[in-house]
Amino acid sequence: MPDQGPPVAIRGDLDTTVRSLMSELDALSRIIADARQEVAALRADDSDIADIPGATDELAAIVSHTAQATHEILDSCEALETVSARVGDADAEVLQGAITRIYEACSFQDITGQRIAKVVAALQAVERRIARARQGLPDRLPIVAATASLLNGPQLPGNGISQSAIDALFD
Amino acid sequence: MSIDRNMKVLVVDDYKTMTRIIRNLLKQIEFNETDEASDGHEALAKLRAGNFGLVISDWNMQPMTGLDLLKEVRADARLKHLPFIMVTAESKTENVVAAKQAGVSNYIVKPFNAETLRDKIEKVLVHA
């Protein structure tokens, strides 16, 4: 028996759905075309665009300067540790406690460095996408290809789990 | 059970400041025999060449991550029982679970303090 397709009532519903989908696709297509025109109209010397490479350089410099400063703080701590070995027990204990707290606090450089690296990667991705869009090339690359194999880095407060929750997984 | 504080500890992190901080903290709790590596490949080579008693590793490193290093260690007949602590900013539950499934001995989330480091080291070495 030949296939007569869906009943008329269902076919009517399908036609409406298809028309609605086509309309949505047309609207999306117009939005993309408009966005492409706007991006193509951007000039490389437009301040918003021209600032991106500079911004990434500035952020990289922050990481470099904080690393340098942290090493200098650690140099000073190590010098203090040699002194603490030559003073009395009570003073040595106070010194060691203070040095430990400085070491703990210095781990900020690792956390801020990872956060800034994420921002740099995002800015570089925006820069690459704008450059590709201006050339009219298809965009087939993932947004942050260079760091795709890495994880998310430091979580914002409330997004990760606490050390005590992690401990519970190991108890 | 006493802990052998003369054992060699390998600290693995691509941030030089972090390896320096951890090594200094280890020194404060009397682990003086420490060495460092800046990624998983370098760490694995050092572990296979040397006689280490503990690994303290970051997760986010390239080209070989801390998780990949952990898997390589657990797959190596000579290293598979080596205590391995992950010290990382990755605090998503799925990451902790993935590390545990791969055989991590304990997991410390950054930023951490000296007390937490000492506590976890003692815990894994007592159970090693």
Image (cartoon, coloured by chain):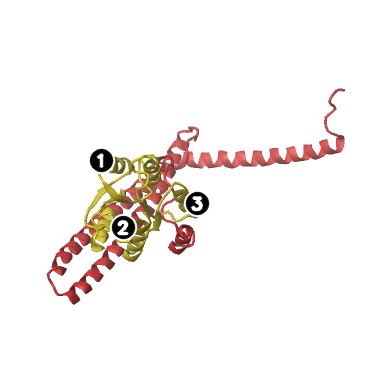
Chain colours: A red, B yellow
In front of the other: B8 or A103: B8
Residue type at mark 3 is: Glu
Q: Position of residue B94 (x, y in %)?
A: 50, 51
Between label 1 and label 3, give the one nearer the viewer: 1
Q: Position of residue A18 (x, y in %)?
A: 74, 37
Chain letter for mark 2 = A
Mark on residue A109?
Answer: 2
Residue designated by label 1: B49
Which structural element holds mark 2?
Answer: helix
* Circle 1 SS class: helix
- Extreme left residue here? A86
User: Which residue is denoted by mark 3 in the rendering?
Assistant: B94
Q: Quadrant of the N terminus of chain A?
A: top right
Residue in the picture at 27% in, 48% down: B52
Q: Is residue B75 above or below residue A120?
A: above
Share a chain, discs 1 and 3?
Answer: yes
The crowding category of the residue bearing disc 3, from other C-alpha atoms within 10 Å (few below 14, some 14 to 19, many at least 20), is few
Query: Of the residues shown, which amino acid type is indicated by label 1?
Result: Ala
